[in-house]
Image (cartoon, rainbow, N blue to C red):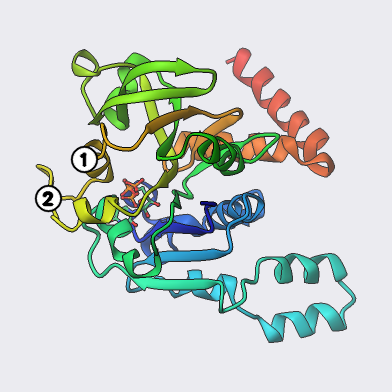
């Protein structure tokens, strides 16, 4: 069955970006000139997703506003003859029939956020995209995964190798057999210390899951910090239907982290033809200045 729906959990507090995220959701922070969340929606669209389910915090109206109509702005841009800007704001509109918003009243963790979207998912595989992970790739990361998942079925997570001392930031897998980009998952551990990590293969924010995950999430098991973790729920599914890690092609940027966010801005600026030379000149000038420090 093809993947037609995607959940975007965007109800976190974004504390690492305070004070910017005091009133602006982290997922609305721009990389170059587009909010993180718009990159995520575009990636989903290019993977064939038709239904977009946003799990928002009670105060995050900015997200619904971004994907809605903006009649006054459209009129002004139309009147003043700015067709490319007009197209750019029309491009980010989602028809109301394609966008659903569900409120996560309290930030009880990623697993809880996904569970909040359960009523919009039927008996079919669905995607989860964390917009603070950007993947710059020739073929968008989720599209790569959808093709792979159609081949093997079951649950699938995007994975990458991380430095040994970073395992405590991620869900980490115990790997089994490897077939090309696919890794059989034999176990999953949430944020293990390096010495306890089963590998250095870490999950990033792209998932294709079967609806049976909701039975596990419904148990509402909390970890020591009081959060309901997606990794814990996924770990209980191992051993039934296939569960694969997918080594995607592309470069991932952790935009939930300040340095990762800055790096993404440079990389995405360099990737834009009209900005490349100017951004490169700035980076080189700064590198020279740093060398002579
Ligand atoms: P993060 O842990 O990266 O986001 O969650 P955060 O908690 O907002 O960030 P910091 O650590 O305080 O800076 C990963 C994703 O899960 C969502 C976040 O919005 C982000 O997209 N999330 C997290 C929820 O939707 N609800 C939650 O309760 C927790």
When asked about the image quadrant of residue 245, the answer is: top left
> Between 291 and 68, which is closer to the camera in this rendering?
68
Tell whether 127 sits left or right of 145. Answer: left
Q: Residue at x 64, y 36 (%)?
A: 266
Q: Residue at x 68, y 37 (%)?
A: 139
Q: Residues within 10 Å of mark 1 (few under 14, many from 20)?
A: some
Do callouts 1 and 2 mark residues in contact (Cβ within 8 Å)?
yes
Q: Residue furthest right?
A: 81
Q: Which mark is residue 261?
A: none
> Between 57 and 218, which is closer to the camera in this rendering?
218
CA gap, disc 1 to disc 2? 9 Å
**Rendered location of residue 222, percent (x, y):** 12, 49
For label 2, the residue is 221
| Figure check: 86 above or below 187 | below
**Rendered location of residue 151, percent (x, y):** 54, 35
Between disc 1 and disc 2, whose residue precedes?
A: 2
- Secondary structure beneath disc 2? loop
**Rendered location of residue 263, percent (x, y):** 56, 33
Q: Residue at x 50, y 74 (%)?
A: 64
Q: Residue furthest left?
A: 224
When asked about the image quadrant of residue 284, the answer is: top right
Tell whether 189 sits left or right of 26. Answer: left
When asked about the image quadrant of residue 289, the answer is: top right
| Figure check: 180 above or below 24 | above
- Secondary structure beneath disc 1? helix
Q: Residues within 10 Å of mark 2 (few under 14, many from 20)?
A: some
> Between 114 and 40, which is closer to the camera in this rendering?
114
For label 1, the residue is 232
- Quadrant containing the C terminus in the rendered view: top right
Tell whether 71 sits left or right of 103. Answer: right
């Amino acid at each position: 069955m093809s993947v037609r729906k995607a959940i975007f959990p965007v109800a976190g507090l974004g504390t690492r970006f305070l004070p910017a995220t005091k009133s602006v959701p982290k997922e609305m922070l721009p990389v170059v000139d587009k909010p993180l969340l718009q990159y995520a929606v575009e990636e989903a669209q290019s993977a064939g997703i038709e239904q977009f389910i946003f799990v928002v915090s009670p105060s995050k109206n900015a997200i619904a506003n971004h994907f809605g109509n903006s009649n006054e702005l459209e009129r002004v841009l139309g009147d003043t003859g700015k067709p490319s800007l007009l197209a750019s704001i029309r491009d980010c509109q989602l028809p109301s029939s394609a966008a659903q918003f569900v409120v996560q009243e309290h930030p009880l963790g990623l697993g809880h956020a996904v569970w909040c979207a359960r009523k919009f998912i039927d008996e079919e595989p669905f995607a989860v995209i964390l917009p603070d992970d950007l993947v710059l790739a020739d073929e968008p990361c989720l599209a790569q995964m959808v093709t792979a998942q159609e081949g093997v079925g079951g649950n699938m997570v995007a994975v990458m190798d991380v430095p040994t001392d970073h395992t405590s930031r991620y869900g980490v897998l115990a790997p089994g057999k490897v077939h090309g980009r696919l890794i059989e998952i034999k176990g999953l551990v949430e944020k293990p210390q390096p010495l306890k990590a089963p590998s250095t293969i870490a999950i990033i924010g792209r998932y294709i899951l079967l609806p049976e995950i909701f039975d596990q999430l419904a148990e509402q098991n909390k970890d020591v910090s009081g959060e309901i973790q997606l990794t814990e729920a996924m770990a209980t599914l191992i051993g039934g239907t296939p569960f694969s890690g997918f080594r995607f092609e592309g470069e991932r940027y952790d935009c939930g982290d300040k340095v990762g966010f800055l790096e993404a801005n440079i990389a995405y600026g360099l990737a834009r033809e009209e900005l490349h030379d100017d951004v490169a000149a700035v980076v080189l000038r700064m590198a020279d200045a740093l060398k002579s420090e």
